[in-house]
Image (spheres, rainbow, N blue to C red):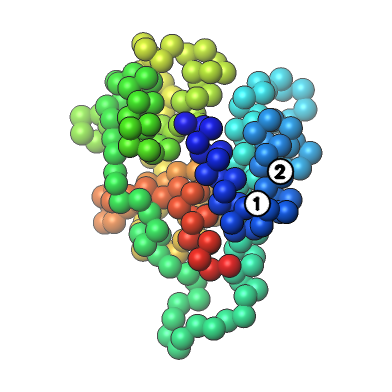
């Protein structure tokens, strides 16, 4: 659930950046939709658009998480280098920190079914299929927004109505910082991870934050 995600995220930010971190306070404000003055919202929410408060709150959360990752990357870069000869300077591969549990659902399944499976498997996203091919991805935040804020009926609305397509994917042998950049460029918290064109996992903002917890 979004509440569980918020609690886990607050714990991660506190562990990584400290309880006095401005970004922890910004995330707490974002949960209330009141972090607009603390994070850059100009691209998604220009003045006068009338964006609903729930969607604005989700976007503010995303911006704070972007800032957290940027802060952690800056710290990593400025840390004294104590690496062994021959060790890469660009960080580990994405495949080392992705979730290898690839879960999927038919795009014709209802939003309720998608939500129930995410809760059962404790996942923030599901890949959606059509004739056994991956055609899109749905996240818990998008599902919550469409049902709660936009009034979609979870019992009758197919998941494909809320999926992001095509699937945004990145090769697993690329450095983890490339996943950070792609998430920012594509405005997403989840990426499918591929090897030789086949999806082998999923990496999320939470996976990346956990990686940085070991290097700062």
- Note whether 36 is above or below 144 in the view shown: below
In the image, residue 50 sits, relative to residue 141, either above or below, namely: above
Q: Is residue 127 at least partly visible in the picture?
A: no
Q: Is residue 124 above or below residue 97?
A: above
Whether residue 66 is visible: yes
Kindly identify the residue that appears in the image at 50 percent across and 83 percent down. Answer: 83
133 left or right of 7 in image: left
- Residue at 66% in and 21% down: 52
Q: Secondary structure at mark 2?
A: helix
**Image disc number at residue 26:** 2
Give the residue displayed 50% in from the left and 48% down from the top. 205
Horizontal and vertical percent for residue 170? 40, 53
Q: Residues within 10 Å of mark 1 (few under 14, many from 20)?
A: some
For residue 104, side relative to residue 180 (left or right): left
- Looking at the picture, tell me which residue is in the foreground, 205 or 43: 205
Viewed as shown, does residue 116 lie left or right of 214? left
Residue at point 61%, 27% (across, down)? 55
State the image quarter where residue 82 is shown. bottom right
Percent from the top left, x then y, of residue 151? 52, 12
Neighbor class of circle 2 (other Cα within 10 Å; few <14, some 14-19, many 20+) is many
Q: For the C terminus, which image quadrant?
A: bottom right
The label number, if any, that marks residue 44 in the structure image: none
Q: CA distance from mark 2 to mark 1?
A: 10 Å
Mark 1 and mark 2 in contact (Cβ < 8 Å)?
yes
Label 1 belongs to which residue? Answer: 67
């Amino acid at each position: 659930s979004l509440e569980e995600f918020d609690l886990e995220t607050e714990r991660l930010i506190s562990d990584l950046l400290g309880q006095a971190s401005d970004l922890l306070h910004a995330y707490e404000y974002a949960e209330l939709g009141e972090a607009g003055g603390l994070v850059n919202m100009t691209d998604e929410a220009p003045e006068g658009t009338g964006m609903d408060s729930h969607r604005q709150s989700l976007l503010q959360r995303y911006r704070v998480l972007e800032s957290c990752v940027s802060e952690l990357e800056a710290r990593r870069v400025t840390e004294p280098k104590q690496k062994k000869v021959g060790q890469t300077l660009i960080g580990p591969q994405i495949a080392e920190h992705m979730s290898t549990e690839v879960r999927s659902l038919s795009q014709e399944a209802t939003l309720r079914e998608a939500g129930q499976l995410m809760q059962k498997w404790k996942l923030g996203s599901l890949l959606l299929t059509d004739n056994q091919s991956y055609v899109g991805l749905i996240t818990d935040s998008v599902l919550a927004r469409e049902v709660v804020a936009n009034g979609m009926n979870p019992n009758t609305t197919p998941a494909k109505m809320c999926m992001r397509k095509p699937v945004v994917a990145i090769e697993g042998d690329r450095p983890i910082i490339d996943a950070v950049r792609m998430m920012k460029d594509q405005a997403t918290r989840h990426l499918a991870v591929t090897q030789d064109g086949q999806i082998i996992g999923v990496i999320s903002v939470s996976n990346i934050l956990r990686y940085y917890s070991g290097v700062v």
